[in-house]
Amino acid sequence: QVQLVESGGGLVQPGDSLRISCQASGASFMRHAVAWFRQSPGKEREFVASISRSGNIDYADSVKGRFTISRDNDKKTVYLEMTSLEPEDTAVYFCAARHTIWTAPDTRAAGDYAYWGQGTQVTISS
């Protein structure tokens, strides 16, 4: 089982950058694919980015070219580097993980992820 704790959220201005982190604990972090989702008030939770065990990366079109996901297996941490932030990026950002085989395809479905963090608030406002 994996426990996830997000951190690094905050209030920034449009155009700013921010890096949020997802710290994992528990066994077998290297055997998990990890994703970031976000949810704004009144909206459904949406996929942002994912990184597989093998390092394959997928981004939602809305963040492609602005956000970068990475993982450090030694530190059991996944990062989301966000640049050129827009007010529309305001949301609670959640980290999620799923245990997979090496060749498992990427998935954007929230239901495919068994483990979730509590979320970190990211607010973009001038």
Image: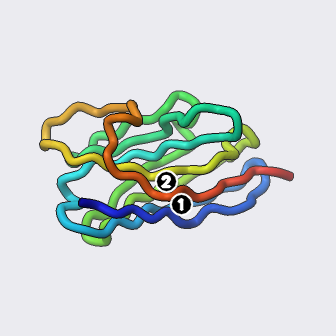
Q: Give the answer, above or below, for where 82 lies relative to 66.
A: below
Residue type at tag 2: Leu
Q: Relative to 104, is 81 on the left or the right?
A: right
As helix, strand or loop, the secondary structure at mark 1 comes to strand
Residue denoted by label 2? 80
Task: Pick whichever of labels 1 and 2 is earlier in the sequence.
Answer: 1
Above/below status of 30 relative to 40: below
* Dots 1, 2 in contact, CB < 8 A: yes
- Relative placement, left or right, of 101 versus 34 is left
Which SS class for mark 2?
A: strand
The residue located at (61%, 50%) in the rendering is 92
Residue 55 visible, this angle? no
Q: Is residue 15 visible?
A: yes
Residue 73: horizontal and vertical position, in percent? 26, 64
Q: Which of these two is toward me, 15 or 42?
A: 42
Q: CA distance from mark 1 to mark 2?
A: 5 Å
Q: Amino acid at mark 1?
A: Ile
Near mark 1 (Cα within 10 A), the count class, few <14, some 14-19 or many ≥20, is: many
- Image coordinates for residue 5, horizontal then vertical, percent: 45, 65
Task: Decide if residue 16 is on the left or right side of residue 27.
Answer: right
Q: Whole-percent x and y of residue 36?
A: 46, 46
Q: Quadrant of the N terminus?
A: bottom left
Residue at 14% x, 37% y is 103
Q: Residue at x 52, y 28 (%)?
A: 61
